[in-house]
Amino acid sequence: MRKLWWALIAVFFCLQAEAQINRNAIKKNNKKIGSYRGKSNSFGRQKAYSALGVSLNALNYYGDLAPRPSKVSTDISFTKPGIGVSFMHRFGPRYTVLGTFMFGTLRGSDAESADKNDLNNGVYRFKRNLSFRNNIKEFSAVAVLDLFKNDGNYIARVKWTPYAFVGIGMFMHQPKAQAPATDLNGTALPQAGDWVKLRPLGTEGQYSTLEATDANSGIKPYGLLQAAIPFGLGARLRLNEVMDLWADIGFRYTFTDYLDDVSRNYVDLGVLSSELAKSMSYRTNELGLATSNHPYVARNGQTYVVEAGYGEENVSNNRGSKSDRDVYMVTSIRLTYIIGATFHKAKFR
């Protein structure tokens, strides 16, 4: 990640340097063009133009491991950085298509976010004690609509404009969590302290043989390639003849409830395939705060002692809420550089 940050900084300064050289050439070659703010017919050849961009992003997660069950609940302290590269093409007075590849991270944790003094929701979430980290690799294509239109070429673009955007995106994800020191039997785990992939473990019974009456009966493994709908608002500021600064807040409505590996009910611990899977499915025991220890004999014949309402097959033992899809927010600061914008190509008609 550190190398990516340095690469992004290097690209930023290269764009700045090239922009300054280009700007000087603009003024030297044609002072009239350098100061022009006119409209449509003077520079018809360059009404449509393209640009490259780099962005610094901040990501926030909304889902089952948010502090509260509200759809707008998130833990701002878990804001994680991201970087992106973009290509944009303007093809109308208000219209731009923007394609972006972004890499960033999402994170959530019951123990760190839930209010254990909130008897309505916080206590349940705190005792659940689940957590995750998820690296997101996203490609999106959005249509950008400017509030203030530009009928001229790139030189005549407005000093600033608010804009809205909506589009389609695809992203790769891989939820992970840090393995505890011991399994549910108190035996040291070989993976202790490691960030392990959660999907292959089937923490909600995805790879287990469940009975037809089980709450999670018929559950399937979730996909790691998912679609999303990006949408949001922002503002763009003209820095000079060839550079703009964009700032926007956007949301990604996803079609999965498994950014956090949490969606449905607990399963009988005896059906899970490994001690690691059991330890990642039920984690209340790690808190040492159980107030109502509940022993039960699992389907593998072993007795497990769990907190009542957790870690056992029951239609009421919710691990998550499958009725809602996960969402993540991306706040971006983007610098764009208009490519091919040499002013000797632009001519008066």
Image: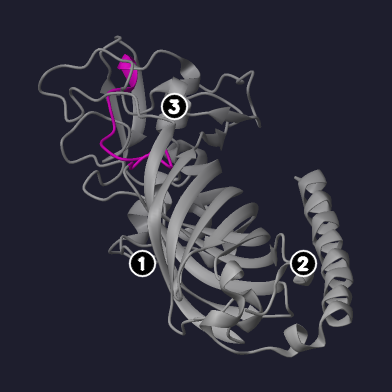
Residue 63 visible in image: no
Distance between the alpha carbons at the discs numbered 2 and 1: 46 Å
Q: What crowding class fits label 1: few (fewer than 14 Cα within 10 Å), some (14-19), or many (20 or more)?
A: few
| Left or right: where 348 falls relative to 265 | right
Total numbered circles: 3
* Residue where numbered disc 3 is placed: 199
- Residue 133 image point, x, y percent: 55, 43
Q: What crowding class fits label 3: few (fewer than 14 Cα within 10 Å), some (14-19), or many (20 or more)?
A: many
| Left or right: where 44 falls relative to 73 | right
* Residue where numbered disc 2 is placed: 342
Amino acid carrying label 3: it is Arg
Q: Quadrant of the C terminus?
A: bottom right
Distance between the alpha carbons at the discs numbered 2 and 3: 51 Å
Front-most of residues 240 and 331: 240
* Residue where numbered disc 1 is placed: 72
- Picture quadrant where residue 146 is located: bottom left
Q: Earlier in the sequence, mark 3 or mark 1?
A: 1
> Which residues fall within the magenta stretch?
256-271
Instruction: Please report contact status of discs 2 and 3: CB closer than 8 Å, yes or no.
Output: no
Tell me the SS state at disc 2: loop
